[in-house]
Image (cartoon, rainbow, N blue to C red):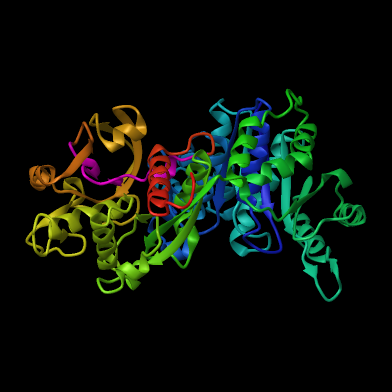
């Protein structure tokens, strides 16, 4: 029988439920268990696809084309196992499903209520992954904070689920905060006590408390929390602030979180966790032999979570190259022809980020022109790739006013065009080209050199595409279309022949980079930035 672990949060948001869930899953996976994680989000949007990145951070896309919460990125980066539509459920989707059933007459005229209809739908979604038979343990992270109105149906569903499946098949971990009061010089347990009290008022008793803290917990504090919150003292876990999220599995191993979970679920310990490759990654990450400065040019740079997977991909690729990647966030709205040299001064590489809409586009194009002309390594992702196509059209092909029709529907040179199947679509949510699609790579190209194979698969999230009417002009002028979708003939990768590293992808490579498998395009980009750095700083040894 599949076992179920629920992770709730209290006191405040942003305590790191996703990282704790992923860390526990990593430890259980390294003991030989088949583990997956799902996220239950309390907002009423159907998915994050239509949310502004300032609202919710990046929208993470799965292999099967689900637009999901960014925590699913953490799950994949830690476990190196793909997630799917079933791994992220929102209140919007729950209510949509229930209302659709009501309209079909599935409830036989009954009054549709939060209990049992909404809670039953939540429980069905919790159990869906377990019913596949592919997993020994399903970890379910509940978004929001205990006490939020939006979270109440989920807490109630967990209460029912535990009652129906029994205490040895289910377990609740409550993540809470131990604030440190400088004036008193001590950690305070009262917020944790109140958070647990509130959870228990809803009928859910936590088995394990994970306490986020800036200062080490004493044994006295552990005993106090255990006494007042009615949990075993060994089930009060310290989660101290770490220098990197990738330290957390080792910290949880030290706290024996995985052992406590397996004991309470009455599962065998199996082998001790094998984390050798994880420790090797951390060793390279923390002991780099070189460093580079890379500019991330985008329009959501005030919120780094808007580019979370890109940032993590640089961490993976940096460790692979034993190189510290210093990311410099540059707002594309602040770049123009007169200051582009100043803005990009001292960078060893430039990544132009994905996005939607006209804001900041000309700044991205000016940045690409500068790095193209000055042989600075460049990497463009989705809209970043499209901006490179536009820049090349204007300044090399001399197609004055060339643009994407997303930005200028009246352009005389629509080098980026709306995909044919998108032309009749009016709804915004879930209607883009989403999920994994194949790509054939031409041999002898930078892309082939990175991947080491001619057929790959990458994840997409876009409506616009390279206009193949201009294909020959680009190839003749030196911008090669090195990656093509074999089914639709859509351009997937562009690159420049006579440039150290100038590559753009229509897809989102950052979504497939993990600790175990850093993405090859990021690895080669960091490698190119290292080479550029030392060629321009000859006094520094390699």
Q: Quadrant of the N terminus?
A: top right
Q: Position of residue 488 (x, y in %)?
A: 19, 36
Task: In the rendered view, tell whether residue 468 sits above or below residue 26.
Answer: below
- Which residue occupies the extreme front position in the image? 539
* Left or right placement of residue 281 versus residue 166 in this view: left
Residue 365 x/y as whole percent: 25, 62
One can see residue 485 in this view: yes
Residue 200 is situated, as x and y percent measured from the top left of the image, at 78, 55
In this rendering, would 165 be left or right of 255?
A: left
Q: Nearer the viewer, residue 304 or 482?
A: 482
502 is within the stretch colored magenta: yes
* Whether residue 206 is visible: no
The percent coordinates of residue 227 (x first, y second) are: 91, 54
Furthest residue toward bottom: 183
Question: Count of labels shown?
Answer: 0
Residue 426 lies in the magenta-colored region = no
What's the residue at 38%, 59% (across, down)? Answer: 50
Which residue appears at 39% of the width and 40% of the height?
524
Q: Is residue 442 left or right of residue 376?
A: left
> Which stretch is magenta?
489-514
Instruction: Give the camera-side residue of 158 and 280.
Output: 280
Image quadrant of residue 297? bottom left
On screen, residue 183 above or below 529:
below
């Amino acid at each position: 029988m599949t076992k179920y672990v629920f992770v709730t949060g209290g006191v405040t948001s942003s305590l790191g439920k996703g990282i704790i869930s992923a860390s526990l899953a990593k430890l259980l996976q390294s003991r030989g268990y088949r583990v997956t994680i799902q996220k239950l989000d309390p907002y009423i949007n159907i998915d994050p696809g239509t949310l502004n990145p300032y609202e919710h951070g990046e929208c993470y896309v799965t292999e099967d084309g689900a637009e999901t919460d960014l925590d699913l990125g953490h799950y994949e980066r830690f476990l190196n196992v793909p997630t799917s539509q079933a791994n992220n459920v929102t209140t919007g989707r729950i209510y949509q499903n229930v209302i659709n059933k009501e309209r079909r007459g599935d409830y036989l005229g009954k009054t549709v209520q939060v209990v049992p209809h909404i809670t039953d739908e939540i429980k069905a979604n919790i159990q869906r992954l377990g019913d596949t038979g592919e997993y020994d343990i399903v970890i379910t992270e509940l978004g929001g904070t205990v006490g939020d109105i939006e979270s109440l149906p989920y807490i109630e569903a967990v209460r029912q689920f535990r009652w129906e499946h029994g205490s040895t098949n289910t377990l609740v971990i409550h993540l809470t905060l131990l604030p440190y009061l400088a004036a008193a010089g001590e950690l305070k347990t009262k917020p944790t006590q109140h958070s647990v009290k509130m959870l228990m008022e809803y009928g859910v008793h936590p088995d394990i408390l994970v306490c986020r803290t800036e200062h080490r917990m004493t044994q006295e504090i552990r005993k106090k929390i255990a006494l007042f919150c009615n949990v075993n003292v060994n089930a009060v876990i310290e989660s101290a602030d770490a220098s990197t999220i990738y330290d957390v599995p080792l910290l949880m191993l030290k706290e024996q979180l995985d052992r406590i979970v397996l004991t309470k679920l009455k599962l065998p310990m199996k082998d001790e966790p094998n984390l050798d490759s994880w420790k090797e990654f951390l060793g390279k990450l923390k002991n780099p032999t070189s460093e580079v400065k890379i500019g991330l040019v985008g329009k959501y740079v005030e919120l780094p979570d808007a580019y979370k997977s890109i940032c993590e991909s640089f961490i993976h690729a940096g460790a692979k190259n034993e190189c510290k990647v210093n990311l410099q966030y540059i707002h594309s709205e602040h770049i123009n022809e007169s200051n582009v040299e100043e803005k990009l001064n001292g960078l060893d590489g430039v990544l132009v980020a994905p996005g939607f809409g006209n804001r900041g586009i000309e700044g991205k194009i000016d940045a690409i022109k500068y790095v193209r002309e000055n042989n600075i390594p460049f990497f463009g992702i989705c809209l970043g790739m499209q901006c490179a196509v536009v820049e090349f059209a204007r300044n090399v092909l001399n197609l004055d006013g060339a643009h994407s029709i997303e930005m200028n529907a009246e352009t005389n040179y629509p080098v980026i065009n709306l995909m044919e199947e998108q032309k009749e679509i009016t709804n915004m949510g879930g209607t883009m080209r989403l999920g994994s699609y194949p790509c054939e790579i031409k041999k002898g190209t930078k892309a082939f050199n990175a991947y080491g194979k001619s057929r790959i698969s990458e994840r997409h999230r876009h409506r616009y595409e390279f206009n193949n009417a201009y294909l020959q002009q680009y190839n003749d002028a030196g911008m090669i279309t090195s990656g093509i979708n074999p089914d639709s003939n859509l351009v997937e990768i562009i690159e420049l022949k006579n440039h150290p590293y100038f590559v753009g992808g229509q897809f989102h490579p950052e979504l497939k980079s993990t600790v175990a498998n850093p993405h090859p395009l990021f690895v080669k980009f960091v490698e190119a930035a290292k080479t550029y750095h030392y060629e321009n700083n000859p006094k520094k040894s390699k």
